[in-house]
Image (spheres, rainbow, N blue to C red):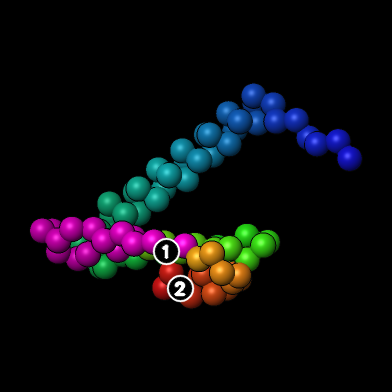
Amino acid sequence: MQEALLLPTDVLDFQLQYMDNRDSVDEFVQHSRHQSVLVFADGAATCEGFGSAAVVLLPLGYDETEVEDSVTFSAPTCSHDMEVESI
């Protein structure tokens, strides 16, 4: 089976879509920050079962610092477990 080639226009389209999405997220964070605690969490595992989880917490207070944490697992796990771990 022949792999599909990634053309420069595909890369540009992806970059533009990424920037549009990033702008939307940035706008949401700026609008919502300090009105509510915001938490972004994600977790994933490879087909082999090695996984990681990460979380970013944006506190309510203006003088409070953001909290970031992550963990990796070298023992077999699944994406569901990684999602739960991030929470």
Q: What residue is disc 2 on?
A: 85
- Camera-side mark, 2 or 1: 1
Question: Disc 2 residue type?
Answer: Glu
Category of crowding for the residue at label 1, using alpha-carbon neighbours closer than 10 angstroms: few (below 14), some (14–19), many (at least 20): few
**Which label was assigned to residue 5?**
none
Asked if 84 appears above or below 15 in the picture, the reply is below
Quadrant occupied by the C terminus: bottom left
Q: In which quarter of the image is the N terminus?
A: top right
In the displayed structure, does residue 10 sit left or right of residue 5? left
Q: State which region is magenta.
A: 56-72
Which of pointers 2 and 1 lies earlier in the amino acid sequence? 1
* Vertical side of 84 occupied by 25: above or below: above
Can the viewer see residue 60 in this picture?
Answer: yes
- The CA span between labels 2 and 1 is 9 Å
Say left or right for 66 vs 62.
right
Q: What residue sits right under mark 1 in the picture? A: 71
Q: Image check: 66 left or right of 63?
A: right
Query: Does the segment drawn in magenta span residue 64?
Result: yes
The one nearer the camera, 14 or 80, is 80
